[in-house]
Amino acid sequence: MDKDKSNKEIRVRMAPSPTGSLHVGTARTALFNYLFAKHYKGKFIVRIEDTDKERSEKKWEEDILKGFEWLGLEWDEFYRQSEREDVYEKYIQKLLESGKAFYCWHAKEELQKEREKQMQAKMAPKHVCDYRDKKLSQKDIPDNSIVRFRNDVKESIVFTDLVRNEVKFNAPDFGDFSIAKSTKEPLYNLAVVIDDHEMKISHILRGEDHISNTPRQILILEALGFQRPKYAHIPLLLGGDKSKLSKRHGATSVYEYKEQGYLPEAMFNFLALLGWRPKEDEKEIMEKNEIIQEFDIADIQKSGAVFDVEKLSWMNSLYIRKLSKEELTELCVPYLEKEGFFVRQKNTLKITANGEERSYDWLKKVITLEHERIKKLSDITEGLEFIFKEPKYESELLIWKKSDRQGAIKELKELSVIIQNIEKSDWTKEDIENIIMPHAESSGLPAAPGSPAQVGDRGQVLWPLRAALSGKKASPGPFEILEVLGKEEALKRINTAINKL
């Protein structure tokens, strides 16, 4: 999209209702608003729509705001609808006095019967109220009254959507729709229109599920003499089966992904590419400032975007690999601590593994074992559990696919002797590898004809060693594991493996 021709300041808003945790779909919409505002050096406004007092809760407001902060969506202005009753009352009174709104006191049962008759007659449900011309003094207004918009518009309502182009609705189909419970309690469509005008919102970027609200909001803003903002309705997020994303597809809350150990930078990058692509660049790993620079509403796709958790995990793993050893350790400590691998005493970690107290530098070395392997931070607990606790496994795991039980016993016994003779001063990954590899080269199966000898060719020796140390089919290499386990623990595990066999 080219810069707004009027050169007016770009002002967008994200207006979540605090009735539940921050949904990834809401986060994606907020992200698009943020990118659009920052691209044009405009303002990103957060407005909590908490007029539904029965369902709104402070804890959900906090969850939403913390989610925005975690993603790095810094807002320029902040509002709560619950603190704006006086503003709404002024405009509701204006609509009532101008005859654009009126009081309706039809009982719910009457309206339900009317609706059922219309549906049986295959008509679009609407209420054209016979109270629309009643002039009441304040004292004569019935207690059960609501405020309705007087819809006298006969032609179509047409607006240009920046994503969907021209959209058209038949105005009479909406009837006289409700806009407020009282002069101090506006309903959604009225409160939104008033707030967007008062906050000078220039563009409204929201989910396509709000398209049906747009014509009603246009009717209200024109009745109040407000300038119409520009609209962009963004396709919804879909699950893997192409239906609307819901809990049956897995986690839908930003908090859940944060708890699992997805990094905010990865989630920012991933959400930005759900339904939007840079014009001429297919790359997928993009920094925040780069995304801001490239973002254009014109590049938002019209079809729904699939929330692919596997792709998010892949992207997250790339961001994890960018972390330094120190950063990764700090981020992983809470997950390991939660599993009880070590305890915190007066803000100091007491790290123990297999009954032996360890240093923080040792912990960094241990966590680095999984640096290239984990897709999310919580994976660290499963990946490293064998370091802190003696592993449990079946004896068949120790047998290399080209060997047998007796071959595994033989290799482990020989390895036990070799390791017993390694000096503690030589207990580094490099030294251990230099000592064990010649044995693996001479005892292991020969490499395939014409191929260079590799560690993988020596599975007859290295497979039972790694399996004995880790108890896993897949784990870091045996030399890395030996270094962090230490000589005594390594020999203990090798002897346990021999006894299993």
Image (cartoon, helix red, strand yellow):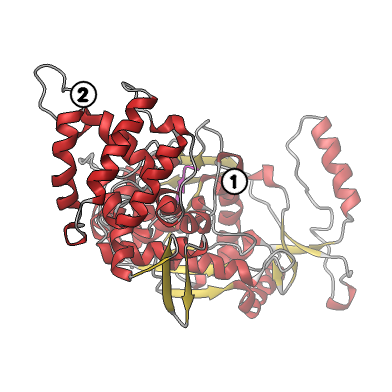
- Residue that mark 2 sits on: 445
Depth order, front residue of 496/208: 496
The picture places residue 220, in percent across and down from the top left corner, at 60, 59
Q: Nearer the viewer, residue 122 or 323?
A: 323
Q: Which residue is mark 1?
A: 212
Span of residues in magenta? 230-236
Q: Earlier in the sequence, mark 1 or mark 2?
A: 1
User: Would residue 313 be visible to someone looking at this image?
Assistant: no
Q: Which mark is residue 142?
A: none
Residue nearer the viewer, 340 or 485: 485
User: Is 428 displayed left or right of 344 in the figure?
Assistant: left
Q: Position of residue 132 (x, y in %)?
A: 79, 58
Query: Predominant secondary structure in magenta?
Result: strand
Judging from the image, what secondary structure is the residue with disc 2 in? loop
Image point 87% across, 53% down: which residue?
Answer: 108
Q: Residue, x 49% and y 58% (percent of image)? A: 259
